[in-house]
Image (tube, grey):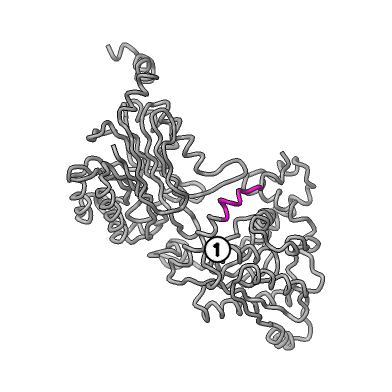
């Protein structure tokens, strides 16, 4: 399976222009014969929306997504967008396949600490659901969702094979760490413990001094970073992954096998 | 671990990050040039090296703005930066306009005079930003910004600031990384607003002390008591904390009386990069 990550920059609040860019990279990925392309969080709008949520959000059925839907006959597409529904706003991601919306995930954990103001503008999603794609059981998380161990537990419980994390992660560092180390730790641990692929798609570019660092990557089910996109640079990043690695990793470490009868899933008698 | 070692940065990454910051945050506005006030000090030197990497030497204008009492070393060091980087430069003496203003008053203390010099330089830089269709790249570091050791709408004024989140010690690390002229690294930091001025003498503590205290207080969320336990005098830690608090206004645009349902910067909230 050939997977592309559209590690893009966006223009704040300019939905039409950003969607054209998403379409452009999707076309490139199609011509590179990729099977799936993943874009970052809020790829249609940019991140620091503040009052732009009133004008830059769109209903998921808005015609603005028609061209991408059309393209999903040739490639599966996952991208972050600012969603509007009946006067409420969500930080969402859409998975398109076969010309249709296969799944929409609404970010459940909206950061509102430090520099973050998401909870001020967006409503939280109520659940994290897994869904079947032509590649297997898939779960999408958006940025902060992935810092909650409960999200990884749901992905595990649902027997996820591909975990997609869409992100707009700002750069910071201190004397002990660089921001991306946190992402590598989280994704490698999740991949290893749960025996699935993790696709981490992060944006690039600056918004009022806040730099989104890129460095998107893919972790295999053994917890190894297979390949990593560059720091700060907008690129179409393409990697091959062998879906059979999920089975191989689970043959080697069949963690779920012994999990089913303990309290993680409820008491053993519940299953009988 | 020595406390100051906590401030160590990966100069390779940080410099490439700052170069991209300057490149992207200038070019996305439709401009491609930068104006920087070159004092011959470490801060403006590092900013100039970053701007040159970001935009190319032909797109960076270093403006030297001596007053008649400015130290000779300042000009010489600034010219070394020009020579090393190959950026454009211009010397604009501010003696005449500053003295014309001073002559309106019988007596002016050195703080008033210093502020006027800093603001005269601000006028010069922003005038040249219009002339060259450029943005003014700021040169205030995090230590100064937190301490409020600068002139509001003077040296603190700029369009964008690549070094405002770096402590003085970290500026020195970058300076060594860029191989800036040794005389600039060696000399004592000075705002050079009056003869013989020394930052550290005027502040009453060293930059290294300030950096470590500020880093623990604000970056690491230590309480003043916890910082004192690291081995600093109570008076020093509390004095620095008070300074930071007292100077918050210098780090913000003017406050606005909220009257309507949507007040600029309160609940009319857009980033500078709106549509860019």
Question: Which residue sits at x=42%, y=30%?
Answer: A190
Q: Quadrant of residue A148?
A: top left
Question: Which residue sits at x=42%, y=67%?
Answer: B260
Q: Position of residue B269 (x, y in %)?
A: 43, 61
Q: Is residue B245 visible?
A: no
Q: Which residue is mark 1?
A: B53
Residue B200, compared with residue B58, is above or below; it is above
Q: Position of residue B6 (x, y in %)?
A: 67, 44
The magenta span reads: B8-15
Please tell me which residue lies in front, B100 or B32: B32
Please tell me which residue lies in front, A87 or B62: B62
Examine the structure image and report whether residue B13 is included in the region drawn in magenta. yes
Host chain of mark 1? B
Please tell me which residue lies in front, A223 or A263: A223
Q: Quadrant of residue A200?
A: top left
Q: Is residue A2 visible?
A: yes
Q: Quadrant of residue B223?
A: top right
């Amino acid at each position: 399976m050939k997977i592309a990550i559209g590690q893009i920059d966006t223009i704040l609040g300019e939905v039409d222009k950003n969607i054209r860019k998403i379409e452009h990279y999707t076309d490139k990925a199609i011509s590179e014969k990729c099977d799936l392309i993943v874009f970052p969080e809020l790829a249609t709008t940019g991140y620091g929306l503040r009052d732009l949520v009133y004008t830059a959000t769109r209903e998921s059925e808005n015609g603005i997504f028609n061209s991408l839907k059309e393209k999903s006959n040739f490639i599966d597409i996952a991208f972050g967008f600012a969603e509007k529904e009946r006067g409420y706003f969500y930080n969402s991601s859409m998975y398109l396949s076969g010309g249709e919306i296969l799944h929409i995930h609404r970010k459940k954990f909206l950061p509102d600490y430090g520099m973050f103001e998401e909870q001020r503008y967006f409503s939280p999603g109520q659940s994290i659901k897994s869904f079947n794609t032509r590649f297997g059981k898939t779960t999408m998380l958006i940025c902060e969702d992935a810092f909650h161990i409960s999200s990884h537990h749901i992905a595990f419980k649902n027997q996820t094979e591909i975990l997609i994390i869409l992100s707009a992660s700002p750069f910071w560092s201190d004397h002990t760490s660089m921001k991306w180390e946190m992402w590598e730790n989280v994704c490698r641990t999740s991949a290893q413990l749960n025996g699935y692929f993790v696709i981490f798609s992060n944006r690039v570019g600056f918004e009022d001094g806040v730099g989104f660092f890129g460095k998107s990557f893919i972790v295999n089910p053994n917890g190894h970073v297979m390949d990593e996109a560059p720091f700060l640079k907008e690129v179409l990043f393409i990697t091959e992954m062998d879906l059979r690695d999920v089975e191989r990793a689970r043959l080697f470490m069949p963690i779920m096998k012994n999990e089913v009868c303990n309290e993680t899933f409820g008491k053993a008698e519940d299953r009988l | 671990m020595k406390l100051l070692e906590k401030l160590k940065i990966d100069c390779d990454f940080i410099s490439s990050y700052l170069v991209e910051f300057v490149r992207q945050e200038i070019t996305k506005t439709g401009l491609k040039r930068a104006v920087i006030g070159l004092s011959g000090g470490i801060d403006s030197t590092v900013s100039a090296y970053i701007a040159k990497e970001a935009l190319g030497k032909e797109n960076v204008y270093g403006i030297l703005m001596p007053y008649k009492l400015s130290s000779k070393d300042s000009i010489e060091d600034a010219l070394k930066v020009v020579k090393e980087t190959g950026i454009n430069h211009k010397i604009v003496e501010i003696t005449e306009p500053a003295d014309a203003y001073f002559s309106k008053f019988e007596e002016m203390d050195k703080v008033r005079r210093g502020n006027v010099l800093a603001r005269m330089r601000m006028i010069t830089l922003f005038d040249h930003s219009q002339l060259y269709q450029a943005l003014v790249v700021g040169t205030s570091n995090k230590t100064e910004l937190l301490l409020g050791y600068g002139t509001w709408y003077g040296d603190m004024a700029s369009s964008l600031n690549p070094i405002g989140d770096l402590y003085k010690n970290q500026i020195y690390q970058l300076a060594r990384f860029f191989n800036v002229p040794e005389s600039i690294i060696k000399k004592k930091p000075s705002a050079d607003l009056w003869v013989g001025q020394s930052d550290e003498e005027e502040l009453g503590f060293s930059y290294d002390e300030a950096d470590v205290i500020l880093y623990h207080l604000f970056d690491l969320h230590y309480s003043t008591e916890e910082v004192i336990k690291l081995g600093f005098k109570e008076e020093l830690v509390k004095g620095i904390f008070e300074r930071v608090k007292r100077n918050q206004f210098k780090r913000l645009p003017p406050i606005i009386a909220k009257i309507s349902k949507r007040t600029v910067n309160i609940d009319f909230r857009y980033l500078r990069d709106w549509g860019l």
